[in-house]
Amino acid sequence: MVNDAGQLYTMEGVAAGIIMLLTAYIVVSTTSVYTTGDTHIPDMQLEQLGSDVLAMMDTPDTAGGESSLLGLVNGNKGPEFKDAFLNYCNATTSGAIDNLHMSANVTYRDASSNVINEHSFVTPDETWTGRESAVRVTRWVQLDSQPWPPGPVRPYGTRAQAVLVEVLLWRA
Amino acid sequence: MACMNEDGQWIVLMGLLVAVGMFFLALIINQSVLVGQTTAEGVLEFPKNDIRDLRSAIFDYVDTELPDGVKEDIIAISLERKNAVVNFTVNQKMDVSGRWLHPVTIHYNNGVTVYNETVYY
Amino acid sequence: MLSLDFLAGFTIFMLALIMVVSMVPGLLAGLQSSGIDYDAVAYRTGVILVEDPGWPVYPSWELYGKAQKDEIQRMGLAVSKDTPNVLLSTKVERFFENTSKEDQDPFFTPEDYRSKVIFGDIPYSYNFSLNISHSDGTYGLKQAGDPLPPGYGYIRRVVKIKEPSVAEIDGSSRPEYIISNPSAPEWQTSTARNFTVRLNFSQLLDPSVSPAYRIDPRTEPVNVTITNFEAYLNITEPSMDATLHNVTFLKMDPTRPNPRFTRIPFSYDTIDPNLYTLHVNGTSDLHSLQPDVPVKSSISLVLKPAATSLFTLDQNSILDIRFNFDHDPPQTNITGTHLYDYVNVTRTDLKTAVLEVAIW
């Protein structure tokens, strides 16, 4: 009654079982777990917020007035720029203060040598380790020629020029 | 065995079918997680604020009576820091329904998005 | 008759199949198809609110009453499409109308918010919060929607809000509106004393002024405040208050061949706070536009854009608001026309605000 004619069925069954188990294991172990950082959604939120803040700082409150961003860049006032920027960024509707940090550079062109230079406007604070996922937002600022005699010479030169303010924004 | 008994092959076939089905299901699940990601990446990739900012910088340039060097500033810094090729021309004022406005032509290309505009300002 | 070996093979196969099938639900765990795009929907809603003026634009959607609310296609708070991130105060007030009051229904139902701001097939829950920082350091919070759950999609936008302008006529600093020679013969023929505030629309709607700073009486309230009215009283009469007889609206279209001022038909005798408010002497009582009340110190008239839209004005019209004081003998020496333009009017600064949108 018992013969080895059915050994084939057993072997086939074992082979089929091994195939299924192997596939299941490979499939389950390769399904990636996406953290929220991988989806770039926090980057999108930060970038929109940073662009908004720079745009609002560049909008004069009164018609024909000077925007606060222009005044700060013209006068090379790094600490005041940092305070004003972070005030805008960290304000929420519930009154809680968010935990965003920033550093800023001003990029300008040296007309005589046609070289692009960077002036460090706001240095990063102690929360900057270099490994945060930081977002860069920029804004153009048109500077008028500095009158003669000039006050403290601004680092970009005295001619009328367009400079680019770059802000790095990260969540600590 | 005397001959190859192929009756059991249907068991392996079923096993293979189930494996293929699992593979297909996992593929669908893998793609679905990307829905939120590609939306955010699409938003980040489109230079909405860059183009708006560039237009406002060019309008400021027109407002301040076209000072020298500003156009070269914008083109050079855009290429170097924003990775975008920018070009713009401001022509003589012309009469547009009763107002005297400059025709301004703007070209922006950051490798992914190309933007061309002719506007009267 | 099944052989034993076949059964053994088949059993091993079935056992393996059952193990695999029981592992499949683990693949699908943690997957919610509707939860993936909360952040994307919140971002899109934020863009519609902050960068879009809404549709329809002329007449603007915030002027629609409850009866025509269905004709609104999209609610956006921006002043215009050229001024993103600058919001108009009348749109903000309409959007958040009655959302914080316990005893009144909000102007827009949750279904309105879903179909006119959020869009999409899934009925999302929402929470909109706007925190405005006033110039004196206080904050005003406006909210619409449900309280926040533990997890939600979120976007935060920084905006500035444009408030309406005020024409302030201070009696002590505006002597040009006093009749210099009250006993001259031209002032003896009539006892009517008129003071006019003139809005020249072609001057106000100047396209060279950015919409963020433009005065637009079609979308913003017109506020005329006369203070220190004692300077305009007729001091030769023993201390008498002037009686404000009526306030009339006149319009003129200068592009017509024979332009002249015509009186605008309006329900001058009904008090309707949705169309205008008239306060006299600083009290909180509302008056109609035919008040016949004695004025001692101040008059404050706010003409809402809902009323201005009834006047059928176009961008070339001239609108006159005439304050008529009539009494025998005349009790006031006020006269003249005050131009409501960019020189004479006090414009408030743009106010910074934070808007947060949560979707779940």
Image (cartoon, coloured by chain):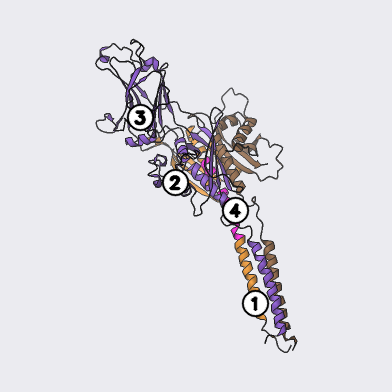
Chain colours: A brown, B orange, C purple
Badge 1, how many Cα within 10 Å: few under 14, some, many 20+? few
Badge 3, how many Cα within 10 Å: few under 14, some, many 20+? many
Q: Quadrant of the C terminus of chain B?
A: top left
**Sooner in the amino-acid sequence: mark 3 or mark 2:** 2
Q: Is residue C59 left or right of residue B12?
A: left
Chain under callout 4: B
Residue A86: quarter of image: top right
Residue position marked by numbered label 2 in the rendering: C74
Label 1 – label 4 distance at C-alpha: 37 Å
Residue position marked by numbered label 3 in the rendering: C200
Same chain for the residues under marks 2 and 1 in the image: no
Mark toward the viewer: 1 or 4: 1
Q: For the magenta stretch, what is the residue range?
A: B30-53
Query: Residue at position x 29%, y 18% from top?
Result: C327
Q: Position of residue B40 (x, y in %)?
A: 58, 50
Residue position marked by numbered label 1 in the rendering: B13
Label 4 – label 2 distance at C-alpha: 27 Å
